[in-house]
Image (spheres, grey):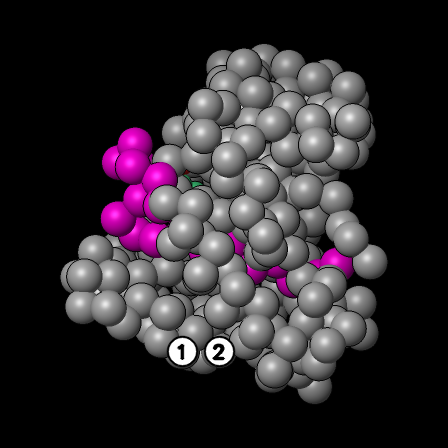
Amino acid sequence: MTRRPYIVGNWKMHGTRAMLSEARAIDRAAQRHMKVEVALAPPYTLIHPIHREAEQIGVGAQDCHHMDGGAHTGDISAAMIADAGAKFVILGHSERRTEHSEGDARVRAKAEAALAAGLRIIMCCGESAETRESGKAVAFVKRQLKASLPPADQLPADIGDKLTVAYEPIWAIGTGNAATTDDIAEMHGAIRALLVELFGEEHGRDVRIIYGGSVKPENAAAIFAVPDVGGALVGGASLTADSFMGIALAASEPFEN
Ligand SMILES: O=C(CO)COP(=O)(O)O
């Protein structure tokens, strides 16, 4: 099955209620791009207000704790974000891995907790500039992803619906320098091969692999034309409806010919 392109906005630590008008505009515009699946991961505080109003877009969170509950001051569980209206959660983002010392085993525990709470997951992976320069990017990402994903027997049968992989090279995030289409093609091909090895031909091909790192309306069409690119995880350019929907338009055009 070929799934719709998946365009996800990661608002990171941006957005107060004043941003709800932007979310509304994204939701309205998304109704015109039904061939693309559009979603937003706002800060926790905006999940419920966006969920209440959104008719077309999916709403998710940027992280969750790996435990169901308990004495974890300042944390939030998968069940809590689901209760607020989240349908998915981004896990293993490099900013979490770096700023909160999250290793692969912790990320994997979060994935198991999220799936148990009925959430879909967007599992992030990506190498640093040093790793790329040393020529070990593909090996690093394959190892990181394999260690961060739950084993096949713990994943639900509808794996292509529950799991999306996001390749986000750290050096491309927020820099304005997206990876080249050649680098994206090589990495997404390697990730696809790993997914087929882990989950079998049918399920491994059903999982969308989306690219993140300085995606903008100007470079989106070229990136979406790369084989095995199933959408984008967008930071800065998802903060306004104009630029975010410019990216969604680039994803829908080839499918509207
Ligand atoms: O980290 C990202 C999305 O999760 C990418 O951020 P930018 O689009 O701002 O580079």
Give the secondary structure at mark 1.
helix
In 3D space, how far apart are the residues under numbered discs 1 and 2 (Cα atoms)? 5 Å
Residue depicted at x 36% and y 75%: 139
Q: Amino acid at mark 2?
A: Lys
* Front-lying residue, 75 or 213: 213
Residue depicted at x 48% and y 78%: 146
Which image quadrant: the N terminus? bottom right
Q: Specify the quadrant of the image occupied by residue 254.
A: top right
Residue 146: mark: 2
Which class describes the residues within 10 Å of circle 2: few (<14), some (14-19), or many (20+)?
Answer: some
x and y percentages locating residue 3 in the rendered image = 76, 50
Q: Is residue 118 magenta?
A: no
Give the secondary structure at mark 2.
helix
> Which residue range is magenta in the image?
161-179
Q: Is residue 13 visible?
A: no
Tell me the quadrant of ligand 1. Answer: top left
Which image quadrant: the C terminus? top right
Residue 143: mark: 1
* Front-lying residue, 63 or 185: 185
x and y percentages locating residue 110 in the rendered image = 52, 68
Residue 241: mark: none
